[in-house]
Amino acid sequence: MRLLTEGAKVLAIDISSDGLEITRNMALEWLEDDKLTLVTLDVSDENKVTDTISSLLKEDDTLDVLVNAAGILRAAHFHETSLDLWNTLIKVNLTSTFLMTKTALPALLKSGKGVVVNFSSTAANFAHPYFAGYAASKGGIQALTHAIAAEYAHRGLRAVNIVPGGIQTGMTKQGGIAFPPDIDYKLFAKQEAAIPGGLGSVHAVAGAIAMLASDDGKFITGTELRIDGGAHM
Ligand SMILES: NC(=O)c1ccc[n+]([C@@H]2O[C@H](COP(=O)([O-])OP(=O)(O)OC[C@H]3O[C@@H](n4cnc5c(N)ncnc54)[C@H](O)[C@@H]3O)[C@@H](O)[C@H]2O)c1
């Protein structure tokens, strides 16, 4: 939504067609017809990603910004984390970031000023209990982003990690995370935001993406931008 208001032409990709329709409805009043294309896609499915992106981006098309925000959060005691849960978290969070970036890379390089904005999490660097699988997937995203930044900087591509703390979204809505029944909240004591007000707003994250995606961010690559109200200083 933020990039649309700044004049971008946006391909909005999500596994949830209902969620995409909500996005379109939010923008309907002022949206120009050709500015928003909705695409329902499981970004962790290699064949579907390849087929869909190659049908959306033709050989001569350029892409200025790729934002890899799709993700899932699951909580469990580490000793109760099944291989199935572990694999799901790695696939949906980390493998999807790899697949989408690899598939979009030719169009990003053709732009000459392409930017990849990947979504990590403060869980990657700051030891969040009950989130070992999620944290590992996000740590992997950070490492991937740094490698891409180093490899393609000379071709004009930038790659940056957004590192949100607690942000008010579908992922963090009341009762949305199934914690173990014997959760020890004291383990989260270090993670109070210094700026009062509970969870942060999505607008704080959207503004950072818009900055990184624009020329204002043109000297920023291969790094993290933490947005957590000071909860991890
Ligand atoms: N909200 C927070 O506090 C917080 C904190 C740190 C990191 N993050 C990260 O921010 C990103 C955005 O999450 P959010 O908070 O907006 O949560 P959200 O649940 O509102 O959004 C995540 C979106 O990803 C989509 N998605 C899930 N699996 C998918 C798949 N296989 N293919 C395509 N789309 C898929 C969902 O349908 C959903 O629209 C995620 O990567 C998340 O890990 C969020």
Image (tube, grey):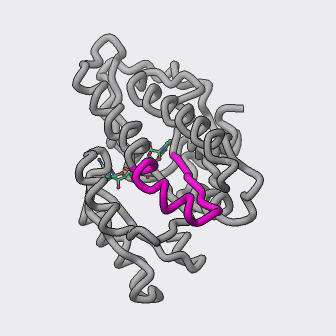
Percent x, y of residue 26: 40, 77
Percent x, y of residue 132: 42, 22
Secondary structure character of the magenta stretch overall: helix
Residue 122, quarter of the rendered image:
top right
Percent x, y of residue 214: 67, 65
Residue 77, quarter of the rendered image:
top left
Q: Nearer the viewer, residue 86 or 199?
A: 86
> Which of the image's four quarters has the C terminus?
top right
- The reply to whether the magenta stretch includes residue 68 is no
Percent x, y of residue 86: 31, 25
- The reply to whether the magenta stretch includes residue 117 is yes
Residue 69 sits above or below residue 223 on the image: below
Identify which residue is drawn at 38% across, 70% down: 58
Identify which residue is drawn at 72% across, 65% down: 215
The part of the chain drawn in magenta is 100-118
Q: Nearer the viewer, residue 160 or 71?
A: 160
Side of 155 where 117 appears, left or right:
left
Identify which residue is drawn at 29% across, 22% down: 181
In the picture as drawn, the residue positioned furthest to the top comes out as: 79
Count of numbered tags: 0
Q: Nearer the viewer, residue 201 or 221?
A: 221
Identify which residue is drawn at 51% across, 45% down: 119
In the picture as drawn, the residue positioned furthest to the front comes out as: 59
Residue 171 sits above or below residue 90 on the image: below
Residue 73 sits above or below residue 180 on the image: below
Residue 16 sits above or below residue 137 on the image: below
Side of 73 where 45 appears, left or right:
left
Residue 183, quarter of the rendered image:
top left
